[in-house]
Image: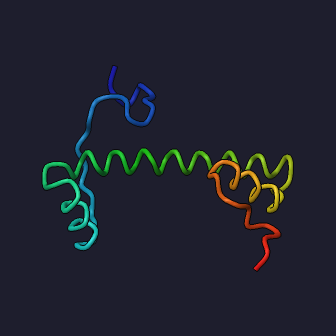
Amino acid sequence: MTDNDVDFLPGDGPTSGISVTLTAGTLQAIRERVGKRGVSAYLEKAAQRQIERDNLDELIADFDKVHGPADPEAVAAKRARLTGGASHAGAAA
């Protein structure tokens, strides 16, 4: 059985080397944060976070198709409750 015969979740399974092209500025910023030897781990985590965001975007789109878009005032109120801040919806200027 090869790795191609098995479905792995993001972050699971054996590692595999690939070639990645980045702009010089992006690579420099990554290396400044994690050093030369931490680039692969940094990119792995960044890719995992992006996959999570993509999956969440798909869930939200599916929810919106069924239930319609969220009410902006309700979202602002929930955000304020979660963050401990005042709601921006209907706030005085």
Q: Quadrant of the N terminus?
A: top left
Which of 55 and 21 lies nearest the eye of the viewer? 55
The quarter in which the C terminus is drawn is bottom right
Name the one closer to the observer, 72 or 49.
72
Residue 41 position, x and y percent, is: 26, 45
Task: Judge left or right: residue 69 versus residue 11.
Answer: right
Q: Is residue 10 left or right of residue 54?
A: left
Q: Which of the 4 image quarters holds residue 72? A: bottom right
Q: Residue at x 40, y 49 (%)?
A: 47
User: What number of labels is visible?
Assistant: 0
In this view, which residue lies farthest toward the bottom?
93
Q: Residue 80 location, x and y as percent? A: 69, 55
Residue 19: x percent and y percent? 24, 55
In depth, the one of 73 and 64 nearer the eye is 73
Q: Is residue 36 left or right of residue 81?
A: left
* Image position of 31 (left or right of 1): left
